[in-house]
Image (cartoon, coloured by chain):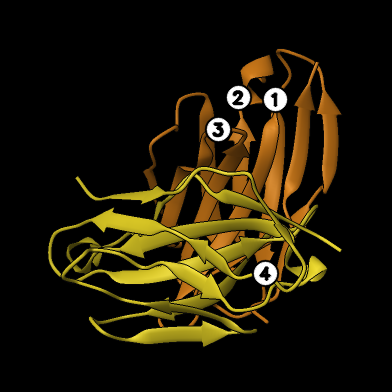
Protein backbone atom coordinates (compact mmCIF):
# COMPACT_ATOMS: atom_id res chain seq x y z
CA UNK A 1 0.00 0.00 0.00
CA UNK A 2 0.87 3.65 -0.05
CA UNK A 3 3.40 4.83 2.49
CA UNK A 4 5.57 7.77 3.49
CA UNK A 5 8.97 7.53 5.13
CA UNK A 6 10.61 10.49 6.82
CA UNK A 7 14.00 10.80 8.38
CA UNK A 8 13.91 10.31 12.11
CA UNK A 9 14.51 13.17 14.45
CA UNK A 10 15.12 15.01 16.48
CA UNK A 11 17.11 17.36 14.30
CA UNK A 12 18.98 20.08 16.17
CA UNK A 13 20.47 23.01 14.30
CA UNK A 14 21.93 26.39 15.04
CA UNK A 15 20.21 29.49 13.76
CA UNK A 16 21.03 30.27 10.10
CA UNK A 17 22.04 26.67 9.37
CA UNK A 18 20.72 24.84 6.31
CA UNK A 19 17.93 22.33 6.77
CA UNK A 20 17.01 19.23 4.82
CA UNK A 21 14.37 16.79 6.03
CA UNK A 22 14.16 13.75 3.80
CA UNK A 23 10.85 12.28 2.70
CA UNK A 24 10.33 9.39 0.33
CA UNK A 25 7.09 7.76 -0.67
CA UNK A 26 5.54 4.68 -2.19
CA UNK A 27 2.29 5.16 -4.06
CA UNK A 28 0.36 3.95 -7.05
CA UNK A 29 -0.43 6.48 -9.70
CA UNK A 30 0.44 10.12 -9.26
CA UNK A 31 0.02 11.29 -5.68
CA UNK A 32 -0.18 14.82 -4.40
CA UNK A 33 2.47 15.55 -1.78
CA UNK A 34 2.33 17.79 1.26
CA UNK A 35 4.43 19.11 4.11
CA UNK A 36 2.62 20.04 7.30
CA UNK A 37 4.11 21.80 10.31
CA UNK A 38 3.03 21.56 13.92
CA UNK A 39 4.26 24.23 16.31
CA UNK A 40 4.33 23.38 20.02
CA UNK A 41 0.84 23.10 21.49
CA UNK A 42 -0.89 23.73 18.18
CA UNK A 43 -2.62 21.82 15.42
CA UNK A 44 -1.09 21.00 12.06
CA UNK A 45 -0.81 23.63 9.37
CA UNK A 46 -0.19 23.14 5.69
CA UNK A 47 3.31 24.36 4.89
CA UNK A 48 3.51 23.58 1.18
CA UNK A 49 2.27 21.16 -1.43
CA UNK A 50 2.98 19.84 -4.91
CA UNK A 51 0.50 18.06 -7.11
CA UNK A 52 2.58 16.78 -10.02
CA UNK A 53 6.08 15.71 -10.90
CA UNK A 54 8.73 18.47 -10.92
CA UNK A 55 6.43 20.91 -9.12
CA UNK A 56 8.15 22.93 -6.42
CA UNK A 57 6.14 23.95 -3.39
CA UNK A 58 7.38 26.88 -1.36
CA UNK A 59 6.32 28.88 1.67
CA UNK A 60 8.01 30.82 4.49
CA UNK A 61 11.43 30.14 2.96
CA UNK A 62 10.86 26.39 2.83
CA UNK A 63 10.91 24.50 -0.46
CA UNK A 64 10.26 20.97 -1.62
CA UNK A 65 10.39 19.53 -5.13
CA UNK A 66 8.27 16.60 -6.25
CA UNK A 67 10.79 14.10 -7.69
CA UNK A 68 8.99 11.20 -9.32
CA UNK A 69 12.19 9.50 -10.45
CA UNK A 70 13.43 9.21 -6.88
CA UNK A 71 9.95 9.18 -5.26
CA UNK A 72 11.06 11.95 -2.95
CA UNK A 73 9.78 15.24 -1.59
CA UNK A 74 12.59 16.56 0.62
CA UNK A 75 11.98 19.70 2.67
CA UNK A 76 14.71 22.35 2.53
CA UNK A 77 15.42 25.75 3.97
CA UNK A 78 18.56 27.74 3.45
CA UNK A 79 18.68 29.52 6.81
CA UNK A 80 16.57 28.34 9.74
CA UNK A 81 15.35 30.51 12.57
CA UNK A 82 14.46 29.71 16.16
CA UNK A 83 10.83 30.22 15.21
CA UNK A 84 11.07 27.25 12.82
CA UNK A 85 11.32 24.88 15.78
CA UNK A 86 8.41 22.49 15.24
CA UNK A 87 7.49 19.03 14.07
CA UNK A 88 7.30 18.56 10.30
CA UNK A 89 5.13 15.94 8.65
CA UNK A 90 5.33 14.68 5.09
CA UNK A 91 2.11 13.28 3.62
CA UNK A 92 0.51 12.15 0.39
CA UNK A 93 -2.85 11.56 -1.19
CA UNK A 94 -2.91 9.00 -3.93
CA UNK A 95 -4.90 9.75 -7.03
CA UNK A 96 -6.36 6.30 -6.57
CA UNK A 97 -7.64 7.40 -3.19
CA UNK A 98 -9.98 9.97 -4.63
CA UNK A 99 -13.19 8.21 -3.77
CA UNK A 100 -15.04 9.04 -0.61
CA UNK A 101 -12.25 9.53 1.79
CA UNK A 102 -9.37 11.75 0.59
CA UNK A 103 -7.26 10.09 3.24
CA UNK A 104 -3.80 11.41 3.77
CA UNK A 105 -0.97 8.94 4.26
CA UNK A 106 1.35 10.39 6.87
CA UNK A 107 4.97 10.12 7.78
CA UNK A 108 5.74 9.90 11.49
CA UNK A 109 7.04 13.44 11.73
CA UNK A 110 10.48 14.96 12.25
CA UNK A 111 11.11 17.20 15.23
CA UNK A 112 13.30 20.23 14.55
CA UNK A 113 14.90 22.31 17.28
CA UNK A 114 16.76 25.47 16.30
CA UNK A 115 19.08 26.99 18.87
CA UNK A 116 20.02 30.68 18.95
CA UNK B 1 -9.42 30.08 7.57
CA UNK B 2 -11.73 27.08 7.44
CA UNK B 3 -13.28 27.96 10.80
CA UNK B 4 -12.81 24.68 12.62
CA UNK B 5 -13.51 24.61 16.33
CA UNK B 6 -12.90 21.65 18.58
CA UNK B 7 -14.40 21.30 22.02
CA UNK B 8 -13.42 20.78 24.69
CA UNK B 9 -9.73 21.71 24.39
CA UNK B 10 -8.80 19.64 27.41
CA UNK B 11 -10.62 16.88 29.24
CA UNK B 12 -9.81 14.47 32.03
CA UNK B 13 -12.17 11.55 32.41
CA UNK B 14 -12.34 8.27 34.28
CA UNK B 15 -11.93 4.84 32.79
CA UNK B 16 -15.22 3.38 31.68
CA UNK B 17 -17.05 6.64 31.15
CA UNK B 18 -18.37 7.73 27.75
CA UNK B 19 -16.82 10.85 26.26
CA UNK B 20 -17.91 12.95 23.29
CA UNK B 21 -15.66 15.34 21.44
CA UNK B 22 -17.12 17.89 19.09
CA UNK B 23 -15.81 19.33 15.85
CA UNK B 24 -17.61 22.30 14.33
CA UNK B 25 -16.91 23.89 10.95
CA UNK B 26 -18.42 27.00 9.45
CA UNK B 27 -17.77 26.61 5.71
CA UNK B 28 -19.94 23.72 4.60
CA UNK B 29 -17.11 21.32 3.81
CA UNK B 30 -18.20 17.85 2.84
CA UNK B 31 -15.24 15.85 4.16
CA UNK B 32 -14.39 15.74 7.86
CA UNK B 33 -11.95 13.56 9.77
CA UNK B 34 -10.97 12.54 13.27
CA UNK B 35 -7.35 11.71 13.98
CA UNK B 36 -5.44 10.86 17.09
CA UNK B 37 -1.82 11.81 17.60
CA UNK B 38 0.50 9.80 19.79
CA UNK B 39 4.29 9.84 20.19
CA UNK B 40 5.91 7.33 17.88
CA UNK B 41 2.73 6.78 15.89
CA UNK B 42 2.24 10.09 14.17
CA UNK B 43 -1.33 10.77 13.10
CA UNK B 44 -3.77 7.90 12.81
CA UNK B 45 -7.20 8.14 11.26
CA UNK B 46 -10.07 7.11 13.51
CA UNK B 47 -13.17 7.85 11.42
CA UNK B 48 -14.11 10.12 8.59
CA UNK B 49 -17.25 11.50 7.02
CA UNK B 50 -18.08 12.33 3.42
CA UNK B 51 -21.47 13.85 4.07
CA UNK B 52 -24.36 14.05 6.49
CA UNK B 53 -24.91 10.60 7.94
CA UNK B 54 -22.15 9.20 5.71
CA UNK B 55 -19.24 7.96 7.78
CA UNK B 56 -16.64 5.26 7.60
CA UNK B 57 -13.91 3.70 9.69
CA UNK B 58 -10.27 4.60 9.64
CA UNK B 59 -7.32 2.52 10.78
CA UNK B 60 -7.91 2.77 14.56
CA UNK B 61 -11.69 2.86 14.91
CA UNK B 62 -12.17 0.24 17.65
CA UNK B 63 -13.72 1.80 20.73
CA UNK B 64 -14.85 4.91 18.86
CA UNK B 65 -18.04 5.91 17.11
CA UNK B 66 -18.97 9.04 15.19
CA UNK B 67 -22.04 10.88 14.10
CA UNK B 68 -22.74 13.61 11.59
CA UNK B 69 -26.33 14.76 11.68
CA UNK B 70 -25.50 18.22 10.30
CA UNK B 71 -22.87 19.29 7.80
CA UNK B 72 -21.17 21.53 10.32
CA UNK B 73 -20.81 19.10 13.23
CA UNK B 74 -18.83 15.87 13.47
CA UNK B 75 -18.91 14.16 16.84
CA UNK B 76 -16.48 11.56 18.12
CA UNK B 77 -17.62 9.34 20.98
CA UNK B 78 -15.52 7.07 23.10
CA UNK B 79 -18.03 4.47 24.16
CA UNK B 80 -16.21 3.49 27.35
CA UNK B 81 -12.95 5.34 27.77
CA UNK B 82 -9.76 3.39 28.43
CA UNK B 83 -6.27 4.58 29.33
CA UNK B 84 -5.07 3.61 25.85
CA UNK B 85 -7.32 6.35 24.49
CA UNK B 86 -5.36 9.04 26.27
CA UNK B 87 -4.21 11.10 23.33
CA UNK B 88 -4.50 14.35 21.45
CA UNK B 89 -7.43 14.29 19.05
CA UNK B 90 -7.55 16.41 15.93
CA UNK B 91 -10.45 17.14 13.67
CA UNK B 92 -9.81 18.12 10.07
CA UNK B 93 -11.68 19.15 6.97
CA UNK B 94 -10.71 18.73 3.34
CA UNK B 95 -11.10 21.08 0.44
CA UNK B 96 -9.69 20.69 -3.04
CA UNK B 97 -7.42 23.74 -2.90
CA UNK B 98 -6.01 23.86 0.61
CA UNK B 99 -6.12 20.15 1.26
CA UNK B 100 -6.51 19.43 4.94
CA UNK B 101 -7.14 22.08 7.59
CA UNK B 102 -6.89 21.01 11.20
CA UNK B 103 -8.52 22.15 14.39
CA UNK B 104 -6.45 23.05 17.42
CA UNK B 105 -6.90 19.66 19.04
CA UNK B 106 -8.41 18.15 22.17
CA UNK B 107 -6.08 16.76 24.80
CA UNK B 108 -7.87 13.84 26.45
CA UNK B 109 -6.57 12.12 29.56
CA UNK B 110 -8.23 8.94 30.78
CA UNK B 111 -7.38 8.13 34.40
Is residue A102 among what the camera can see?
Answer: no
Circle 1 chain: B
Q: Which mark is residue B41?
A: none
Q: Secondary structure at mark 2?
A: loop
For mark 2, what is the residue? B79
> Disc 3 vs disc 1: which is toward the camera?
3
Q: Secondary structure at mark 4?
A: loop
Q: Are marks 1 and 4 in contact (CB under 8 Å)?
A: no
The N terminus of chain A appears in which quarter of the rendering? Answer: top left
Circle 2 chain: B
Q: Are marks 1 and 2 in contact (CB under 8 Å)?
A: yes
Give B89 or A91, whichever is nearer the viewer: A91
Q: Which mark is residue B18?
A: 1
Which chain appears orange?
B
Give B70 or A109, whichever is nearer the viewer: A109
Circle 4 chain: A
Q: Earlier in the sequence, mark 1 or mark 2?
A: 1
How many labels were placed on the picture?
A: 4
Q: Which mark is residue A17?
A: 4
Which chain appears yellow?
A
Residue at point 74%, 13% (across, down): B15
Amino acid sequence: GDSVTQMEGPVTLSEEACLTINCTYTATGYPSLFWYVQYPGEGLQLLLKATKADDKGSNKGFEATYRKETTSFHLEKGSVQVSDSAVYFCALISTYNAGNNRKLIWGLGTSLAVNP
Amino acid sequence: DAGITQSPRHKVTETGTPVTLRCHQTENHRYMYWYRQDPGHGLRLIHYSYGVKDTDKGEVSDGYSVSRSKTEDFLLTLESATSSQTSVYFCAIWDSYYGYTFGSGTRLTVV
